[in-house]
Amino acid sequence: MKYLLQEQPRYTDMAIPADEQEQKNLLRSLFNIRMPGPVSETFLSIQDAYLQEETARKGITTLASLRPVQDHIYLWQGDITTLQCDAIVNAANSALLGCFVPCHGCIDNAIHSAAGVQLRLECSRIMEKQQIEEPTGTAKITKAYNLPCRHVLHTVGPIIHGDVTKQDCALLSNCYRSCLELASTYQLKSVAFCCISTGEFHFPNKQAAEIAVQTVLDYQRKNENSPEVIFNVFKDNDYEIYKQLLG
């Protein structure tokens, strides 16, 4: 915390709270607002030890501990940052740098906060090379750093304003397809999808789930070596929606 506060001139005199939960909130906030840039190896070693300890404390769920609901498809309700598989999917924004709002409740914030500052640095290198914002419906792959998974797949879902259009549906389907194609390219055996676009981007949950399931089933049917898919949900209503769709 002292290292991160010293990077922020306006916060150099900020006192570190005595309460442990307040300390954790401050640390996460400092992760969230930190711009991508050089960082010391000493800081990284301490950060990595802390984040890995926090993940272990929350408990890691392995793919082997889950039971499929259909061939090569799983449904799991829980914190995606604690899931051990080949890749988890991050519902990113078009800047692809993570969420800069301190302790925001979006999945983008949660994934970057649990992975560590290295994830934003890698995303920044990708975007510097790309020179344009990430298009909706495409995907990028990064390392996972302090997450228990091996990789993170970043995809930008459609933002809904008013009624859902055919283009919105096609773009959301592209998100799932692009992630599966990227995973296949890298020979990944398992991918965990969050509920893309249903949070801050306001895609209706049931319609989004229908598109997700249909796209995944179509891809697996057409591609013999398709990765196994975990549909990860956090809210009870999303679990019920996927449970009905997947039988």
Image (tube, helix red, strand yellow):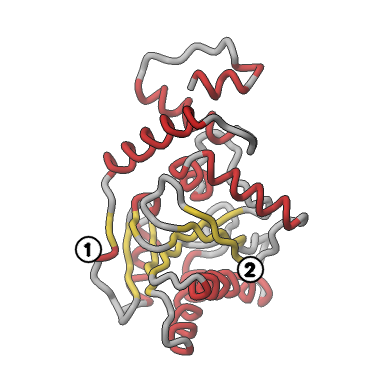
Image height of 86 relative to 126, above or below: below
**Between marks 2 and 1, how big is the CA–CA gap?**
31 Å
Residue tagged by mark 2?
A: 137
State the SS at label 2: loop
Residue tagged by mark 1?
A: 65
Measured as percent of width and height from the top left, residue 122 is found at 59, 48
Q: Is residue 34 left or right of residue 131?
A: left
Residue 4 lies in quadrant: top right
- Residue at coordinates 66% horizontally, 54% vertically from top-left? 126
Residue 65 lies in quadrant: bottom left
Image height of 24 relative to 217, above or below: above
Q: Which sits in the foreground, 228 or 100? A: 228
- Mark closer to the chain start, 2 or 1: 1
Measured as percent of width and height from the top left, residue 33 is found at 60, 33
Q: Which sits in the foreground, 47 or 164? A: 47
Image height of 109 relative to 1, above or below: below
**Image quadrant in which the C terminus is located:** bottom left
Measured as percent of width and height from the top left, residue 98 is found at 58, 46
Outermost residue to the right: 131
Amino acid type at mark 1: Ser
Measured as percent of width and height from the top left, residue 64 is found at 24, 65
Amino acid type at mark 2: Gly
